[in-house]
Amino acid sequence: MSHEPAPSSVPDTRMGVTAGADNGDGDRSEDGDTLVRAPAKRKRNGYLEWLIVIVVAMTSALVVRAFVVQQFAVDGTSMLSTLHNGDRVLVNKLSYHLHDPRRGDVVVLKTIEGVAERDLIKRVVGLPGETISYQSCVLRVNGKVVNEPYLDPTIVTSTSCGPPFSDTIVQKDHVFVMGDNRGGSKDSRDEQVGQITYGNLVGRAFVIIWPFGDWKWL
């Protein structure tokens, strides 16, 4: 009579896993190590992706603010009625790395010691090498009258247009700035401010963004 061999107690290792070794926490590799479940791995990768996105976004915002565009608050009334106290403007900080200042630009200046206004904002009226004068509330450049449509005639009047000055030559790499509220502006006419070097120009203000009622391009 033939006899069947007795069942072996030796674990079956032909497929590389021990029968019954999986406890539900994960699969096992051929050498017995537990594999991480795919969903958990995808979840961690998702968190990492979001972290990278946030870091890149914050870094980009800081770079933009430092080198490209920055918001400034108007402090004072020297630019009435173009700008009002509390208006917020965006300033292009790259402008004067790409081209020289232009007459009529509204510019933000670096802090000037002794001047009360926090963010000094003025308008460029004179460029390097030009001879400018301001007499009887009229601006002249190289002897020619300059049309200034941005001035508010209800604010700049014959009795409220600030101190005059005779022929003045604008120095190299400097601009002569004045406020649109000529009678209430401390600007290049004042020795404490004087002509502004290119290096003291933060940038060109190009739009009012707040309050919404004052929104406009400059």
Image (tube, rainbow, N blue to C red):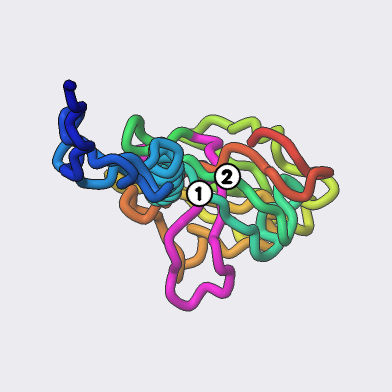
| Quadrant the N terminus occupies | top left
Q: Residues within 10 Å of mark 1 (few under 14, many from 20)?
A: some
Residue type of the residue flagged with mark 2: Leu
* In-image side of 124 versus 4 (left or right): right
Task: Give the mark, 2 or 1, whose residue is nearer the N terminus.
Answer: 1
As drawn, 189 above or below 63: below
Circle number at residue 31: none
- Identity of the residue drawn at 48% across and 78% down: 114
- Whether residue 3 sits left or right of residue 129 in the image: it is left
* Residue at horizontal 56 percent and vertical 46 percent from the top: 123
Outermost residue, front side: 1
Location of mark 2 (residue): 90
Q: Distance from label 2 to label 1 (Cα)?
A: 6 Å
The picture places residue 82, in percent across and down from the top left corner, at 72, 45
- Amino acid found under the numbered disc labelled 1: Gln
Q: Which mark is residue 70?
A: 1
Residue 60 in view in this figure: no
| Contact check, label 2 and label 1, Cβ < 8 Å | yes
Is residue 136 shown in magenta?
A: no
Q: Residue at point 57% right, 55% down?
A: 72
Picture coordinates of residue 101 (x, y %)?
Answer: 41, 37
